[in-house]
Structure formats: structure tokens, C-alpha cells
Image (cartoon, helix red, strand yellow):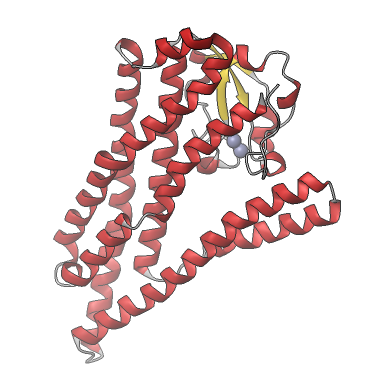
Amino acid sequence: MADRIIAAVRLKRKVLEGVNQQSDILDILDAFTRKVLFARPGPETERLKEELVLLMRKKYFPLADESGRKSAIPILDRIGGAEAVQSASRLSGDSLRFLSGYRQKNIAWFTQEVNTGTTALSSELKAEIARASRDGVSRARMVDDVIGSYKAELKQIRKARKRFAEANKFVANAEATGDIKAIKLAHKERTLAHAGTRRVTTAMGRLENKVQGDARDAVRREAQRAQLASYKQAGFRVYTWVAVNGSIACPDCTSLHGETRSIALWHGNMPGDGHTVCLDSCVCELVPNEFTVDNKSIAGPVNPFLPTLPANE
Ligand SMILES: [Zn+2]
Ligand SMILES: [Zn+2]
């Protein structure tokens, strides 16, 4: 049955990867930086913020909802059959209200975060402009310099993100062989690769990193809520935490693994709500308790990075 958890995680991760590698956020940042930000760092950062929020609202949140609902299907199918799948297929009433209420809060949160980032960028650009004028550097050259170093950094960040994605697979592969030495090495590489994704020095790079990270969090939580709304609508009320990421799962998630509570008691402490060591990167699953009962294949954290899915039970 672990295969269904893995399928759910992978489905949701697809959207997350979409956020990670998409170019729309970069396009927006690039267009603003080149054309208007340097001329009017204050007012134009407002517009930059609005465009980023609009992108999330129009594109990524709807995608997240869809993938969240889809990821519930195989699990509902396993515990309640076609009837459960059918009853969750179209959200209405309470479940829909639950999801749209969450959406509002999520958008407000994202807006707030982007606001912090764009305000910081705006003041850094103002300082940059002032420095250039003091040093007698022409505006055009300064803009070229700033954009040039951002572009170079962006290349590095992208490489680092790819390396990190690969590192997760290395760990899963090493674990599948059971070779302690290989596992240790893979973990070391993963730590290094992760640090690489955090190394940014330019103002634009910082904003890009922040916006991408915030977008990922918002989308991930949105997908998790949509999945939960489907379970709720199908009539399930008691949920069990299933840790994912295999041995990479953080200590909090590992100890929460298998914990069962009613939905009311999970409120505020769901995967990704920020109460675990892994904070925003928690991708754990909250599944109807019925799914995990007598299920040896999810006795420990599930590893969605495994190259092949474990056989269905
Ligand atoms: Zn965790
Ligand atoms: Zn987790």
C-alpha cells in the first residue's frame, strides 16, 4: 500500500517541481528589473508584487488544488472503492468552504511574504543607484552590472537545485542497496547540495530564492488541503500521519509517523504547518486512518524517491 502513498506524494510533487523550474516567476522578475525597477524602485516593486500574486492565484493555486484532489483518489479507491472516489469527485458544501477559506489565507500569506521581499529589493536598488551616482558610474552601466551578476547567480542556483534533486535520488538508491558506506556518502552529498541552493548574494537572487520558496510552500499546503478536503467529503474524519522521504524524514516527522488523531486535533499541526524541524519542506501525508490499519509496508517512513515502486499489496 506504500505505493499509493508514493503515488500521492509524486503527484503533488509534480506541481511543486513545476513551481521550482517554471520560468514565469523569473520572467516577471526579469521584465521588471530591466524595464522599470531601476527607474522607480518604490512604486514599481508594488506592481511586481501584484503580478507575482496574480500568477499564483490564476495558475499555481488551481493546479495545486487539482493535483491535491487527484492524489486522494488512489487512497480513497483503496479504502472506500468507487463509491468513495465518486463522493469526493466534486467538492461542495463544507469541503469546498474549507478549501476556499484556506485559499484566501494562503494568498494573504504569500502576498505578505512577497511584500517583505520586494520591499527589501526596492531599498537595495535605491542604495545601488545612490552608490553609482556617488561614484560617477553611469546608470546604464550600473544596471548592466547588477543584472549581469544576478544572471550569473541564477545559473548557479539552477545548477544547485538540479544537484539537490539528484541527491535525493542518490540517497534512495543507496538505501535500496543497504550499503551503509554508500548511504553515508549520499547523505553527505545531499547536505552539500542543499547548502548550495541557499547560497545567494545579489538582491535579485535573494528575492528570486524567497519568492520561489514561498510559492513552493503555498502550493504544497494548498495541495495538501485539497487532498484533505476530498477525504473529508468522502466521510473520513480520523487521520494518520505518514512520514515520507525515507531516512531523510526529519526527527519530528519520523516520530509523528503513525500518529492518529481526529481532523479537529490535527488542525494547525498538519504537515507543512511549521511545527516540525523540516518546517516548510514537510511533504508528509495525512491519510484516513482506515488506510494505514494493518499495513506493514508503511510501518516506517515511506521513501518516494525509490527508483521503482514497491509492489501493491
Ligand atoms: Zn519533517
Ligand atoms: Zn514531514
Q: Is residue 109 above or below residue 38?
A: above
What residue lies at 30% left-to-right and 24% top-to-bottom?
Answer: 100
Q: With 247 as the anchor, is 198 left or right in this view? A: left
What quarter of the picture does the N terminus occupy? top right
Q: Position of residue 302 (x, y in %)?
A: 67, 34
Image quadrant assignment for residue 33: bottom left
Is residue 131 at all visible to an observer of this figure? no
What quarter of the picture does the C terminus occupy? top right
What residue lies at 85% left-to-right and 56% top-to-bottom?
Answer: 181
Q: With 311 as the anchor, is 20 left or right in this view? A: left
Q: Is residue 263 above or below residue 253?
A: above
Image mark count: 0
Most foreground residue, 279 or 120: 279
Q: With 147 as the anchor, is 194 left or right in this view? A: right
What residue lies at 26% left-to-right and 46% top-to-bottom?
Answer: 55
Q: Quadrant of ligand 2?
A: top right
Q: Is residue 154 above or below residue 88?
A: below
Q: Position of residue 286 (x, y in %)?
A: 55, 24
What residue lies at 47% left-to-right and 7% top-to-bottom?
Answer: 83
